[in-house]
Amino acid sequence: MRGRARPGARWRVTPPHHIVRRSFWSENGGVSRGRSETSEDDGDRGDATCPTPACAGSLTLMFESGRPCATRPITLGELDALTVGRASTARTAQLSTVGGERRLTLEIADRRMSVVHAQLRLTPEGWSIEDASSKNGTRINGLEVSRAILRSGDLVELGRSFFAFRDDIPHPVRSDTPEPPLELATRNPALARQFHDLIAIARSSIPIVVRGEPGTGKEVVAQAVHQLSGRSGPLQAVNCGALSRSLLESELFGYRKGAFSGAQEDRPGLIRSADKGTLLLDEIGDLPLECQPALLRVLQEGELVPVGGVKAIRVDVRIIAATHRALDDMVARETFRADLLARLTGFTVALPPLRARREDLGALLQDLFARHAPSRTESIELSPTAIRALYAYP
């Protein structure tokens, strides 16, 4: 689509001329387990992995010179040190092994960054960052530091470029794994694992429940699943909390002519309109109890009876239910049917609030700008004050 960015932009790896080369960045932009490295002394390290939980972690570039970007996390667990500085042209990454120590050098296209700006190093306390006498300083969460121990969620500011640090490990990405659609791209490890499983079952007819607070992207996830499903029918959506009980039943199941006052002709309803496609039931927790047995019949038998009708009609529809409510609690209070919930939850996705996936801020803004200002996406640059405020927003 025009103006839309790839969900996992790659770093350009530019190793020195004497090199044992393996792909450090996977083809779809994820960090692979392999490396591109220059070896002066491999020692006994071989393919050793992170020996202790303290060395696990990731660093995600969210803004490059103030412009939002969608890079994949850099896994720190296989490194001893990471140096960040200014690139002459494009963003690059170079891995080397010196004296048995694995070092990654990142160069960022940010003219406000020094040639060697800061270094991250693994210490007994965890990952530390130290300013390398840079011109514009190093800031953590807006405060200038000369040296600091990084904590999960810290916002690292070098020049006009911003990174998110996490102390857990990104979801591993195989080099032959297809790139996820932009709507299901995330740098949050727990969410990435859920999306990986969701993509795997997208082409099935398994019903899905998407849980999350308002504004977490439940409808976006439903749209992505429908696009991946390969189903020939359309995606139909209904907000169960926006219609009265009488209207909801006729909207969902359709009606026959003369079924009620004003029913001048047959109407198929949203479920039949979604035949061979997908039906999104937004705010399923607001579905009245009296409508729930008919929906259960659709899930169990693949058929429905329109309002005012007597003959069952076969339908082939994949149902995705979205809610911000605790449906288990509703079952306990007998305001939601246990058998319906059991049928709906073939697969469940729990979307975290945006405040719990701050490392996705750059990618989300890049997509937002691409959707609403495609001709200006590359030129939009946010101020440090704006980026700090967005990252810290509760």
Image (cartoon, rainbow, N blue to C red):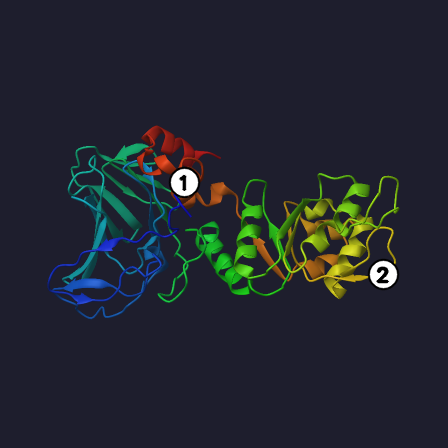
Q: Which residue is mark 1?
A: 370
SS state under label 1: helix
Nearer to us in this view, 320 or 125: 320
Of circles 2 and 1, the one toward us is 2
**Residue 261 pos. (x, y %):** 88, 40
Please state the total of marks drawn on the protein image: 2
Nearer to us in this view, 137 or 389: 389
Instruction: Identify whether 228 is placed above or below 134.
Output: below
Q: Residue furthest front?
A: 265
**Disc 1 residue type (three-letter):** Ala
SS state under label 2: loop
Mark 1 closeness class: few <14, some 14–19, many ≥20 residues within 10 Å: some
- Horizontal side of 205 relative to 40 (left or right) equals right
Q: Which residue is mark 2?
A: 311
**Disc 2 residue type (three-letter):** Lys
- Horizontal side of 14 relative to 343 (left or right) equals left
Mark 2 closeness class: few <14, some 14–19, many ≥20 residues within 10 Å: few
Query: Quick check: can you spot residue 100?
Result: no
Could you give the CA–CA distance between mark 2 and mark 1, rounded to whole angstroms? Answer: 49 Å
Classify residue 386 by image quadrant.
top left
